[in-house]
Image: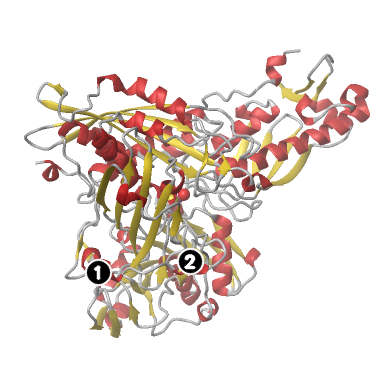
Amino acid sequence: MNEAFFDKKEYKPLDRVDGRLKVTGAAKYSAEYALPNMAYGVLVGSRIAKGTIKSIDSKAAERAPGVLAVISHLNVIKIPGYAARGVHPSEPPTGGQPLRVFYDNKVYSNDQPIAIVVATSLEKAQYGASLVKVQYDQQEHQTDFEANAKNAVIAAAAKKNPKSPTADYDRGQTDAFETAPFRIEAEYVLPTEMHNPMELQAITAHWEADDRLTIYDKVQGTKTTQKTFAKEWDVPEQNVKVIATFVGGAFGNGLHSWPHESAAIIAAKQVKRPVKVVLTREQMFTMVGYRPRTWQKIQMGAAKDGKLVAINHHSIGQTSTYEEFTETTLMQTRMMYASPNVSTRYRLLPLNVATPIWMRGPGEATGAFALESAMDEMAHAIGMDPIEFRLANYTETDPDKNMPWSTKYMRECYEEGKKRIGWENRKLKPGSVRDGEWLVGYGMGTGTFGANRGPATVKAELDLEGNLVMHCAITDIGPGTATAMVQVASNTTGIAPEKITFHLGSSEFPNAGLQGGSSTVNSVGPAVQAACNALKEQLITMAAAKSGPDFGAAKPDDIMFEKGEIQLSGKSSAKLKLSDLFKQNNIQKIEATQESKPSENGKKYSMNAFSMHFAMVHVHPFTGQVRVKKIVCCADAGTIVSPKTAESQMIGGATGGIGMALTEDAVMDHRFGRYVTKDFGDYHVPVHADVPDIDVYFVNKPDLLADPVGSKGLGEIAIIGVAPAIANAVFNATGKRVRHLPITPDKLL
Ligand code: MOS
C-alpha cells in the first residue's frame, strides 16, 4: 500500500484540459454558432448623449436588399418584463434600473442602442443600419467628471444599509488626522478603463417555440442570465437555455445583462428567425460597461515610529443617470492596516454615460491605487522603508470587522517578494539608482479581496472503466476552470486527470453562480469534492456488500482509485477492480449530485485573499519613457489547486495592472459625450513588448475555514496593487509622484 498515494495534498501543474481546443480553433465561442435560417442584427447607436428621439426614418433601410426588419421603440413588440423590470437578485448592488432597450424615445448616453437592423447577412444588416436616419431633440449633456464633481451624491444602497461598503464609515476619532505628527494629503484620479477582452460580446438568440428561448451568449453566469431573461419575457426559467461553453475573456463585462442581448432576443422574436448580434470593438466601449472614472482623496496621518494615526479616504465614482453602479473602492482602507482612526466617504456622480460595471479587482483595484500610493508617500515623508512602514501597521485581526482572519500570510509575501525583486538594491532617496542612462526604481503595492463563496452543485458520473465525468453550470472566462476542477477531482479520487472531464457553461447543468469575484474554485471546488465523496460512499457500500468488512468500515477519505482499482488505506491491502464491482452489481456507472454551500465560518472569521506586487522600472530621464523591467507577484490565496493556470492568472492580472498604470485611458470628447478611443489602436492595452518577466510566488497554505478546498480565490488580487507598485517604483526612480493614471511620459517631464 502506497500511503503517499492517499496523501495527495499536493497539486501539480497540469496543462489546460481545453488548451488544444482553444489553440486549434475547435473551441466554439458565442459568435461562432451558425443556426439554420439565421439572421444578423446590427445595432444603431444614438449620436447624442442626452435628449429624445424625434423621428426615425427607416424606409430606405427597409427597402435595402436582405433587410428583414428595422426595430426601434416605434415598432417593438411588447416585452412583459419591461413593465416592472427590477434588478434581478444576482445583479450588482445597483439602485435604479438597467436600460430597457427600445423602451421609449429617451437617450441617456451617446451610442445607446436605439434600433436594430436585421438582415439575411451581416453585410446587408450593416448596410441597412447605415441608411437609418434619426432626428433628435438634443438636450445639454453632462459627461465631464471634473466639471460636475460637485454634484456627487450618496448612493441609494448606502442610504438603505448603513453597513454597506458605500455608507459613511468612521472608526475612532474623525479629527485625528489634524494633530498627527506626519501628515500627507493627496488626490488621485483613475480614468475610465475598458475591459476590452479579445472576444467581442456576442449573442445568438433562438426562440425554439413561442415561450422557449435558447441563447448562445458571452456571459459570466449561465444561471443568472437565464433568470434575467426568463423574467424579461415572463417565461419559466427552465424555458430559457443559456450556452456559454467558451468565453474569450470578460474581466467583468459579462456580469450584467446588456441592451444588445435584449435587442437580439427581441429581434429573433420579431423576425421569427434566430438572430446573431456581434458588437463592434467601438460598441465594446459604449454598451457593455467599464471601470468607472474615480476621483479619490486621502488624508493620512502617522507618528514618527511609523504607526498610522488616521486615514481619511474619500472617493467619487461615476455612474449613469438611470442606474447606480457602486463598488468596494474603500474596503481595503478599512481593513488592511492597523490605523485606530479611519473615515471613508463614498459618493456617486451620475453623468450622461452608460452604466459602468465590475472590472477585474472591482473597487479594490481603484482604491488600492490611492491607498497604496499614499502609504508610499507617507513612508517617504517619515523616511522609512515602505515595507517596514507596512509591517509597522500589520494587523493580526480585521480592524474593521473586529474578527480574526481565517488565514493571513502576508509576512511570507513581504519576505519572498523582497528577495525576488532585489529590494536590497532600492535606495530610500528617489533618483539615486541608475543603469546606464536609465533611472531605476523599486516599488510595491498590496491588495486584498474577500474570499467570497456561494452555493454550487456538481453532478459526477463514474463508469466501469474509471472515467469520471462532471457537469456544472459555471462558466469559464479564461482562468482554466475545467482544469482546476479536474485537479480537485483527481486529488479527491486518485483518478488520473486524463480520465476526468468537467463540462461547464450551460444553464442546463447543475446550479452555480457567476464566474466573478474570484469565487469559482472556492464555490465549485467544494461541490466537486462533495460529489466525488458521494460516489465513494456508493462504492464503499457496494464493496462492503460484496467484499467484506474491510470496506464496510471505510470512509470516503479511506479509498482512492488507481488504474481502475479501488484501494483502501491503512493496514488493509484490500483492492477491488472497479469493473468487477460494477459487473457484480450489474451496473455500467454510478452518479451523484451534490451541493456545497458557505458555512457559518463567515460570521466568525474575516476571510480575505491577499497579494503583494513588486515592480522594478526603468525611466528615461529625457523622454519620460517607463519600462517595467520586472514584476514579482506574491499571493496568499489559500490552496493553489492548479499551479499552472493560477500562475497564468497572476501574469494576466499583472499585465492588466501594467495597462492601468501606464497606458489605459478611455478618452471622451465632452463636446459630444463620445469616446475618441474606440479600438486597440488608440486604447492601449499592454502588448508583449510592454510586459517583462513576471515572477509569481504563492504561499499556497490552505484556508480550510474558508472552504473545504482551502482556496481563497485569486482572479482579483492578481491585479489589485499592481498599478500602485508601478507608480511607487516610478517615484523611487524619479522623485515624481504621478497621482493621475495612466503615467504617460508627458507627466514625467
Ligand atoms: Mo470579475 S470583475 O469578478 O469578472
Alpha-carbon span between mark 2 and mark 1 = 21 Å
Residue 659 falls in image quadrant: top left
- In the displayed structure, 453 sits above or below 125; it is above
Residue identifier under label 2: 157
Crowd tier of the residue under label 2, counting other residues whose Cα lies within 10 Å: few below 14, some 14–19, many 20 or above: some
Q: Is residue 354 visible?
A: yes
Q: For the view shown, which residue lies furthest in the left direction? A: 622
Residue identifier under label 1: 148
Crowd tier of the residue under label 1, counting other residues whose Cα lies within 10 Å: few below 14, some 14–19, many 20 or above: few
At 39% from the left and 73% from the top, the residue drawn is: 322
Query: In the rendered structure, are the residues bearing label 2 and label 1 in contact, judged by CB atoms less than 8 Å apart?
Result: no
At 24% from the left and 48% from the top, the residue drawn is: 741
Q: For the view shown, which residue lies furthest in the bottom direction? A: 54
At 76% from the left and 41% from the top, the residue drawn is: 591
- Total numbered labels placed on residues in the image: 2
Q: Position of residue 503 (x, y in %)?
A: 60, 43
Q: Position of residue 455 (x, y in %)?
A: 64, 50
Q: Amino acid at mark 1?
A: Asn
Residue 614 falls in image quadrant: top left
Q: Secondary structure at mark 1?
A: helix
Q: Amino acid at mark 2?
A: Ala
- In the displayed structure, 435 sits above or below 711; it is above
Q: Position of residue 465 (x, y in %)?
A: 73, 29
- In the displayed structure, 163 sits above or below 579; it is below
